[in-house]
Amino acid sequence: MKGTAQTDELDTDNSGIKEELKQVALKAGALVFGVADASAFTAAAEGYRPTDILPKARSVVVIGGAKPRAGDWQSPNYQHMELSSTNDRITALSMRLAHSIERQAGYYAVVVPPGVDQGQLPFMSLALAAELAGCGTPSLAGPVLHPEHGFMYFSALITTLSLPVDGPLTQPACPAPACVEMYQRSGATPCTATCPIEDNGCLGGAIVDGRWSERQYDRGRCMARVYNYWVPTFQKILTETLDEPDNEQRRMMINSTLFSRSLWSMTYANISQGQCFECMRVCPVDQANRQLS
Ligand code: SF4
Ligand code: SF4
């Protein structure tokens, strides 16, 4: 890529640059790499599309990886995941690619911030970007799943560089063949059996001809269980503490385990962390990669 100039010719055929970016990403640890057309984000609300972050954006480069290790899935203490979130690594890799695009190809590049904008909404949906770039398909349980690697963290960069687009996958990763079989036997899949919506859980639905014909996901209930310690809890406890008139009670609230864990959680990550991976723990999509022998 070094030495390439911003010319009309390169702007119409950049498969060489794309391949170089892909090799850099894979060599640095990314599991998947894909490119989406910046104009394809019509499902996103106005204000949350690539050109809202970078005017004249042409492409969105998505990389995925940094997923929990095999050992993480073996642990019965799911809370340990809250402080071992690895998504920062994949964001750092995106920044490296953005640097290459700007310094070596001469086009603007912006890494989508992994945090949230107003109203707890992401600046741009990484899930939609991953889907449009062919890095996976949305699962019933929320995360985008890659057919081979399953659950992973994604990062995206928006650029004015026009790159060949990979496009969405045609075959959904969810439901996996094992889930279809289980559904035919029992009316449930591993994730719906773990977190059944009809029994105070979040997931449900119907599978017809190997595909979800009806999906149920209680996002509000899931959020309440996933983000137990992070910013929302900090805000909640702080409000209650400020309203507490009794000095001793206020001191106890500030020193409580819940408040301390919230502070630790925020200290260790600049982005949201999930504290419940139970639906992903039982998901069969990348089970083979979670066993060391
Ligand atoms: S993350 Fe937890 S609460 Fe949310 S759907 Fe999965 S199992 Fe249910
Ligand atoms: S277990 Fe995984 S693949 Fe199966 S239905 Fe649930 S999210 Fe989809």
Image (cartoon, rainbow, N blue to C red):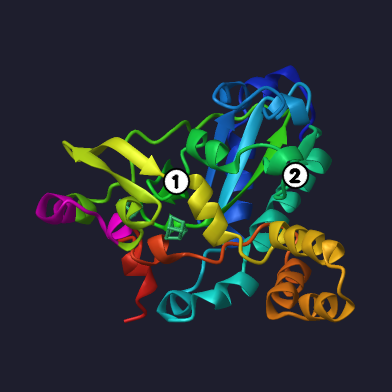
Q: Name the amino acid, label 2.
A: Ala
* Residue placed under numbered mark 2 in the picture: 98
Question: Which of the marked residues, 1 or 2, is nearer the chain's N terminus?
Answer: 2
Instruction: Please state the horizontal and vertical placement of residue 93, each as a whole percent of the image.
Output: 69, 56
Q: Residue at x 83, y 75 (%)?
A: 250
Image quarter where the C terminus lies is: bottom left
Q: Residue at x 50, y 33 (%)?
A: 132
Rounded to the nearest angstrom, the CA distance separating label 1 from label 2 is 36 Å
Please state if 174 lies on the left or on the right of 27 as rendered.
left
The part of the chain drawn in magenta is 181-193
Q: Nearer the viewer, residue 77 or 97?
A: 77
Within the image, what quadrant is residue 256 found in?
bottom right
Q: Is mark 2 within 8 Å of ligand 1?
A: no
Q: Is mark 1 within 8 Å of ligand 1?
A: yes
Instruction: Please state the horizontal and vertical placement of residue 240, each as a whole percent of the image.
Output: 78, 62
Up-down relation of residue 166 to residue 21 (above or below):
above
Instruction: Please state the horizontal and vertical placement of residue 144, each as a whole percent of the image.
Output: 46, 47
